[in-house]
Every structure is written in C-alpha cells, then in structure tokens.
Amino acid sequence: MKRRDAQSIGQLIRAYLRQESLESPLNERRLVNAWPEVVGPAIASYTDGLFVRNQTLFVHLTSSALRQELMMGRDLLVRNLNKHVGAQVITNIVFR
C-alpha cells in the first residue's frame, strides 16, 4: 500500500500553526530574537524592550544619536528583519 498524499512534518506543522493562529506570534518572536543578529552586537547593546504590536516593531534606545542614525535606515532595517524571518512580519519601526 502506497501513500500518495504524504506530507512532510514541516508542512504539517506550518499548517497547524496557521490553523491555530499561532504563526504570527511565532514570527514576531523570531523577529525580536533576530534583532541582535541583524543590527550587530554594538547597536544591540544600546537597545532593550523590543516588542511588536500591529505590525510595528517598538525599540527602546539608550542613545539619542543612535536613534537618529537608525531612523534614517528604517526602511532597510524593516526589509532585512522581514527577510531574516522569511515573512512579512512588520511594516514599520518606532524608536523610543
């Protein structure tokens, strides 16, 4: 007996996460965890309190000069973070 409708475990897990509405929170957590890797350890050391709400990443910065610098490259950061996660998770970043 052959199975013609066999699916990989990865496909089944993705389908389950979508069905249970867990895919979006999981991608948001992946994006927050990817922040130090995408921006580098120097910039990550000046940031804390990252969270995602309504497709917006909120980042608390301890340096106002760095805040201005990152605001200029906001679009590139959004693209790089989404690319790292592999999904369109955020559309904007707010630096505080």
Image (tube, rainbow, N blue to C red):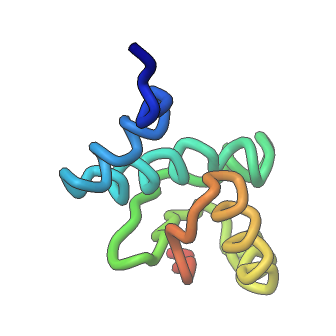
Is 13 on the left or on the right of 19, as rendered?
Answer: right
Residue most extreme to the front: 1
Q: Quadrant of residue 71?
A: bottom right
- Residue 90 vertical placement versus 91 (above, below): above
* Residue displayed at 42% across by 36% down: 5
Is 28 on the left or on the right of 79, as rendered?
Answer: left
Residue 8 rendering spot, x and y as whole percentages: 49, 29
Considering depth in this image, is 16 or 1 the residue closer to the camera? 1
Q: How many numbered marks have been drawn onto this rendered protein structure?
A: 0
* Residue displayed at 67% across by 61% down: 81
* Residue displayed at 59% across by 54% down: 47
* Residue displayed at 57% across by 62% down: 87
Q: Report if residue 49 is visible in the image.
A: no
Considering depth in this image, is 10 or 30 the residue closer to the camera? 10
Residue 19 rendering spot, x and y as whole percentages: 23, 54
- Residue 73 vertical placement versus 21 (above, below): below
Residue 61 rendering spot, x and y as whole percentages: 58, 63
- Residue 34 vertical placement versus 92 (above, below): above
Q: Report if residue 63 is visible in the image.
A: yes
Is 11 on the left or on the right of 38, as rendered?
Answer: left
Residue 1 rendering spot, x and y as whole percentages: 39, 13
- Residue 9 vertical placement versus 90 (above, below): above
Residue most extreme to the top: 1
Residue most extreme to the left: 20
